[in-house]
Amino acid sequence: MSFDFALIGDSIPKILMGIGLTFQLLVLSAVLGLALAIVLLLMRISGRWYLAAPTMVYIYIFRGTPILVQIFIIYYGLPQLEFVRDSIFWPILREAFGCAILALTLNTGAYVSEILRGGVLGVDRGLKEAGAALGLSATHRFIYITSPIAIRLALPAYSNDVISLMKSTALASTITLLDMMGIARTIVAETYAPYEIFISVMVIYLIITWIIQRSFGWMEKRMSRHVRSEA
Amino acid sequence: MDALTGWWDDFFWGSLVVVQVFVIALIMTVLFGLIGAAAKLSKSRAAKSIANGYTIVFRGTPEILVLLLFYFGSAVTLTAIAQVFDPEIKFVDLPPFWAGSLAIALIVGSYATETFRGAFLGVDPGQIEAARALGVSNLQTFIFVRIPAMWRLALPPFGNHMLSLIKDTALIAIIGLEETLFVAEQAIGYTAKPFTMYILVGVIYLGFSTIITLSVMVLEKYANRHLEIAR
């Protein structure tokens, strides 16, 4: 047994061919997931039980089951149902890519909506009351007072969720997609050199994690620049 | 539902495997978490940097990657060692049960490291000083003062770690552990009912998640019983 550096050199360009797909999965499902999370959040804090109750059930289900099982239900499971095959969504659900995006979006949406809710609940009541005293409507209060503060409060937790979403994209390799993980698994199956390949891809994922962390750190700093003491 | 006839017992044994992995991995997670936290809080620079490396690597890479690296990596290493003694041997692997439990325990343990570290730092120094003033030994202070005060703080985030742990057990099906997801795949081979089978797996995991969530609620109530207002 030896550590084959030439193999690493050969494999890294191949693995990097999958980075585009990894980013597509990450960005698309992060954007769609955020949109879903905002809708879920508004339903949850609407104060109407017929809107809040379904949201709570949704969040409970999607946070209580493994993402791998969700991916398998959507990719392998849904085609069993005839009305899915007849529906207009079939061209999307037929493709592994569409299924992966759908599963990742539904999953991250549930987590992010809880994170946003935490941010909204953390906003000082006095500020909202001040807004009301100034005659702002409930909608205006939410847009101009609650949201900016809630976003700032939720940002650190949100950055963690983006990282776990990035890690979840690797599961797309289980439904035949050739993202970085999928390519790495293919190479390992051919060469049987798990250490060389998997550690290389690990390093690439660590770099992506680091970039995400740094970007959010910068954003956090920028958004709280008005509270930083003059140094 | 008819498709499930004859498969209930297989799913039961699969669920039992999930429980076994969960219990074993939970013990290891607590161990890794405590060791990691102790290293991060120690004065030794080497211990600190090892612990930092550990949390960066295991929190920043996809779970499936760690799992595959452990399983195939250990197989390559063990096969190489076995061939030194007997060149006839073609393949030796760590059983998926142990490779999987170890991998998910190391992953969740890296999160637990941060939780425990924060919780130890959150213990009121006055309590430790008081113990010292009473002449209580360091070890006794650790067991009777720091641990009880710390676990109250660590419990809510640790509940989330337990949920991650139970959900991560599903991943071990990828390397061939006969847990519920693996049973579902076999059942699908016979019945061609993927939706039904995977939904059942989802329901089983949702049940486990619910049990954990409720247990943590009870434990939290027990841990903070001295803070309840007397009636």
Image: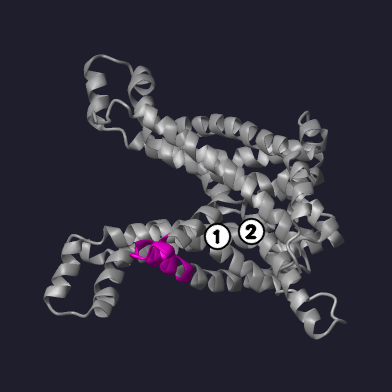
Please provide percent x and percent y for residue A54.
Answer: 52, 40
Circles 1 and 2 on the same chain: yes
Q: Quadrant of residue A179?
A: top right
Q: Judging from the image, what secondary structure is the residue with disc 1 in?
A: helix
Query: Does A1 appear above or below B156?
Result: below
Separation of marks 1 and 2 at Cα, in angstroms: 8 Å
In the image, which disc is placed on residue B66? Answer: 2
Location of mark 1 (residue): B107
Segment tinted magenta in the rendering:
B31-48
Q: Judging from the image, what secondary structure is the residue with disc 2 in?
A: helix
Query: Does B27 appear above or below A101?
Result: below
Query: Does A68 appear above or below B87?
Result: above
**Tag 1 near tag 2, CB within 8 Å:** yes
Mark found first going from the N terminus, 1 or 2: 2
Report the amino acid beneath label 2: Val
Chain holding disc 1: B
Q: Quadrant of the C terminus of chain A?
A: top left
Query: Residue placed farthest to the bottom in the image?
Result: B85
Please provide percent x and percent y for residue A42.
Answer: 46, 30
Chain holding disc 2: B
Q: Is residue A15 left or right of residue A204?
A: right
Residue depicted at x 19% and y 62%: B125
Residue depicted at x 50% and y 30%: A38
Report the amino acid beneath label 1: Ile
Dominant secondary-structure state across the stretch colored magenta:
helix
